[in-house]
Amino acid sequence: MNETLAPRAAGTTRSKFRPLSVDKVEVGGFFGPRLDTVSTVTARMLFDRCIDAGMLDQVDPDRPNPGIVIPFQDDNPNVTTQMFWDSDFGKSIEAAAYALNRTPDPELEARVDDVIDAYERLQQEDGYLNSWFIRIQPEKRWTNLRDQHELYNAGHMIEGAVAYFHVTGKRKFLEIMCRYADYIAEVFGPAAGQKRGYPGHPELELALVKLGRATGEQRYLDLARFFVDQRGQPPRYFDEEAIARGEKPEDFHFHTLEYCQAHRPVREQNAVVGHAVRAAYLYAGMADVATEFSDTTLDAPLDTLWRHLTEKNLYVTGGFGPSARNEGLTFDYDLPNETAYAETCAAVALVFWASRMLGRGPNGRYADVMEQALYNGALSGLSLDGKTFFYDNPLESRGGHHRWVWHRCPCCPPNISRLVASIGTYLYGVADDEIAVHLYNAGKAEIEVANTQVTLTQETRYPLDGAISITVETASEVAFTLSLRVPGWAGSASLTVNGDTVEAAARDGYLRLSRNWRSGDRVELTLGMEPRRIFAHPKVTPDQGRVALSRGPLIYCLEGVDNGSDLNSLVLADGAAIDTREEDILGGIVRLTAKAQRETWPDDALYRSGPPLREPAVLSAVPYYAWDNRDPGEMLVWLRREPGQ
Amino acid sequence: MNETLAPRAAGTTRSKFRPLSVDKVEVGGFFGPRLDTVSTVTARMLFDRCIDAGMLDQVDPDRPNPGIVIPFQDDNPNVTTQMFWDSDFGKSIEAAAYALNRTPDPELEARVDDVIDAYERLQQEDGYLNSWFIRIQPEKRWTNLRDQHELYNAGHMIEGAVAYFHVTGKRKFLEIMCRYADYIAEVFGPAAGQKRGYPGHPELELALVKLGRATGEQRYLDLARFFVDQRGQPPRYFDEEAIARGEKPEDFHFHTLEYCQAHRPVREQNAVVGHAVRAAYLYAGMADVATEFSDTTLDAPLDTLWRHLTEKNLYVTGGFGPSARNEGLTFDYDLPNETAYAETCAAVALVFWASRMLGRGPNGRYADVMEQALYNGALSGLSLDGKTFFYDNPLESRGGHHRWVWHRCPCCPPNISRLVASIGTYLYGVADDEIAVHLYNAGKAEIEVANTQVTLTQETRYPLDGAISITVETASEVAFTLSLRVPGWAGSASLTVNGDTVEAAARDGYLRLSRNWRSGDRVELTLGMEPRRIFAHPKVTPDQGRVALSRGPLIYCLEGVDNGSDLNSLVLADGAAIDTREEDILGGIVRLTAKAQRETWPDDALYRSGPPLREPAVLSAVPYYAWDNRDPGEMLVWLRREPGQ
């Protein structure tokens, strides 16, 4: 949808754009109530469920060793989800930190501290910290990076520690994780005697960049870069590790190291393959390394991977990875709707990847997809009441798809929760002399730019409408560039500064205002928010003869509760007007309606020699993120269409 | 498609219509070359492949015991396909018998006799005959009827024996199988000390009816009836048998006895469920019992099951059973095209079931479906050269679906082969004073009716065109009713007798000519063969906005070799004329062509705000049964359509 936005040429000299930490951004507007829900309901619930699942029994060395609580997988005997428990705690602590940032809660904070204390007691003399490999299978440390999430867990715990440090100022967990990271840096690296391994499930890479930024320690960035550079290098570490275990590399449950993007060095990877979440976490880490090291050799592979995803493998909801079998990619243009896996974690991971692509400079081709995944395929994973979760996010349902209270592999609930609760960090990218506004949402941000403290206040009902006002406050006049994203979907965009229309320089999908800013300067951007039709490439077979409706960043769907059953009996003419109506349901939405035709069938025959009959109907669409929050029923994103009025 | 054909009321007094044995019918016309191919190529090849697979090593007690050659299934450790080998031999002997009927071949006959001799040596003193349970697991006899195909094998061997007897007049195999059937009748039955079991995979029921008819022995019909009546009666035999093995009934691999239609007594079954082939074989046996015993208590369940299949679960090709997981049914209207399992054996089994439903009297609602399954979803299973086979028969392919040379579970190759090679037995149903012509195909039949020998000669190019001539020869004038089917799809039907237009009585989709017939009497029936469009019930989601093309009994498809790639980019207007052209390819076909539009896409974008562009195109369709016999490529049955010219 960004046909007009040419990619930035590789090798361009550039600034480093970094996100704000969560404590620097107050969030209101659209995300405000969602953040409140996650903070007051979900974050606490996640913590409860982790502990109810027995995770603290595994972590706390003062408790009886629980042993194997969840059996090894029947079809993949190298794995039990119990091996991932540290990551669930890591993400839940991260979500709890963001919750505490919004809503102080001494009781929750005390519970987090208890878990951190348990990890402190668990940590080994050498710094090693993994509850499974310390308490359940101590003899297996560092023997199966490919399958057993050992380094992945470290990544999520680091992210939790960084978040908890930013919000509470407490250093204990951060220091625990620094010790562990230092130990990992001893074990893994390019020097003689060090292992050449890397995470089977990428995640640690981007976490180490966060740790490096939070602590100012270059060695964590260097370790992230080592993992990125080493991945897929011959001889293949995961194969050698398998042989050392007495296994045949080709007996790998997924048969190809494409599954974990370790089939070749990252600079030689040219297609998004394998497990979707692993893929996007890896590419996020690559983009972070590209930013921090100004490593232009990663630009071409990142751009190739980005194009491969967005031009051939991305659902219109911003979800990806159609197959449940490998939780990932299959073949180009394979985007089935009803059976779409499109894991919530994959859309969340795509937000992460896209946000890191913006580290190399504001560019709408990345920010548009970040917004698309955020508002649609990610946000759909969380119910409006914050209590239930989608694991997979199909684009069509016959009525049997509903959110879960919990999952044996509970990766998605804390993942979407930590994303929503930290939404403030995705709004802006800050370089030495530039602030890029990637996303629009009411709220206030404290930003240091050009060595000056600046407060930006966004006032907007976005995405309910397209009027955005940004006010600058600063103690002293300061020169910087304020770059405002104009979404690729916007039919129009007008800009004023202090009430005067301005013609800002446009580049890569951003309007760039370079000037001396004074307190009280007010920028007003108005984006066209007309309902739009989206059509899919003819190679996407399931979408042929179909159209998706959208408005602003939101993809819409039909629900049975508004349209009755047999949603596929509705046909929308290309020329039919789409009307909008703001409604105070589902947390506040703009409903789309259109005159359509409903096909009917005169009898019980399965087949007839005449086409279905037709009667006038009105179709009524709501934002995809909000579906399955009312009476259960069918759902459909891609509606049947035909030419005509 | 038979909306006009009301079901015959249950309980009507009726004749028993039985098929002719294969030796009574000469076959020319459409099926002639196909029968030649099966006779000269396929039947021999099947025999070779059975023996190459090692089956004779398992059967012949004079050979070293091969033990377990094919491992037990990973996911269902009660089963190895080696347990089915007797059935493969049974079907292959049956196909060979029909081949010998058409094309005498002493060498093939000698090879069949060798296998029969081996079975003779294998047969136990008590009559028991099963190569797996005699040679590999002798301690397991009659311990797992549910999973291990023990009685199923007996059925296929009986069918083979009956066919071989009819064709060659040799009695050895027939007598071997009578001894085995007699032993089974000792073990299973309602008397004290007898087991209340029945086949886990139905098949023996219909085979016993064949055996009863061939031998004139009522006890085989009685045993068939016992198995039908006993099935699903409480306490459930398969559950008790599982408990006796030390297994929990609920651990059944398929979790429900619906899988094998043993969940309740057959007269209480009201939905087609579970494994598709098992289902249709069972219902065929039920219909046979209904015919032979004039058992009207089976009419209502059979009609309910028939309606459930044909009104909610039948592919337009006559295939059924959409899911590979259970090789069977899922939920109503679940008829995906690209992932359709629609096993060849299921379409073959539906021909069997439909043909048995005609035992209760000619009725187009059954004969139409028999023809539909025969010419489409069954015949597609066999390549035109007779050498390769489809196991599953999707209605759409992206280009990767092709026939196999062989299969680890080689049930389909001999099944479609025996059907084609015995096609003559499906053309007519004969009662005391009535001959029903169910299918039209050139050839000659020797029929005893009203105690008189009559020869019927069909002359027709059907289904290339709809002109059918039937000539009667008889030594003496004889009164009987000749009932001629008028297919539900026929747009028109005109009938003459000796050149004079007649108004025959029409009932249940047949024109009934009751008269004194003399040699030389000539009936001419002309059926309208205009190309037709078929539309599916709106609840069949994948077919919405789509149309299938047909002509006569044949369903058509697009192939890549005629239409290029991206078949889903073609759109056919409802008003577009469909032209026909006879061509001497694919064994002789009528090609359908129509002006259509091809959608194109201007660039590499995955999504755009405008619909695809369009350019004029011509679509070209060939019969579905003939697909994948030329250059490999895409295939599509349900074409995109829209209203208009």
Image (cartoon, coloured by chain):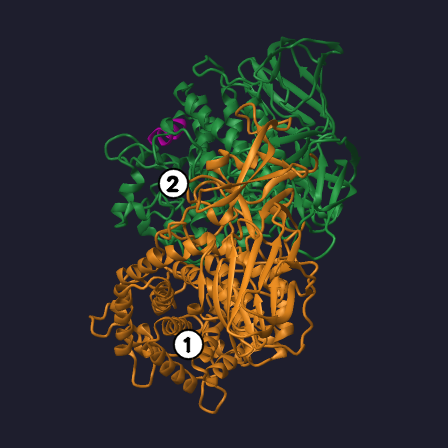
Chain colours: A orange, B green
Residue A343 placement (x, y as % from top left): 47, 57
In which quadrant will I find the N terminus of chain B?
Answer: top right
Question: Is disc 1 on the same chain as disc 2?
Answer: no
Q: Is residue A212 visible?
A: yes
In percent of width and height, residue B368 lies at 59, 26
What residue is shown at x 68% (from left), y 41% (from top)? B626
The answer to whether any part of residue B73 appears in the image is no
| On screen, residue B312 above or below A278 | above
Front in this rendered view, residue B212 or B321: B321
Residue A318's spot in the image, x, y percent?
A: 55, 56
What residue does disc 1 label? A246
Instruction: Please name which of the two marks, 2 or 1, marks the residue nearer to the observer.
Output: 1
Q: Split into 4 quadrants, where in the image is the C terminus of chain B?
A: top right
Above or below A454: residue B21: above
Which mark is drawn over residue B200? 2
Query: Crowding at label 2, few (<14), some or many (≥20) Cα neighbours within 10 Å?
Result: many
Which residue is outermost to the bottom?
A192
Give yes or no for residue A186 being in the magenta stretch: no
Along the viewing direction, whichever of A425 and B37 lies nearer the viewer: A425
The residue nearer to you, when weighing B194 against A149, is A149
B249, above or below A608, in the image? below
Q: Which three-letter amino acid code belongs to the residue tagged 2?
A: Gly
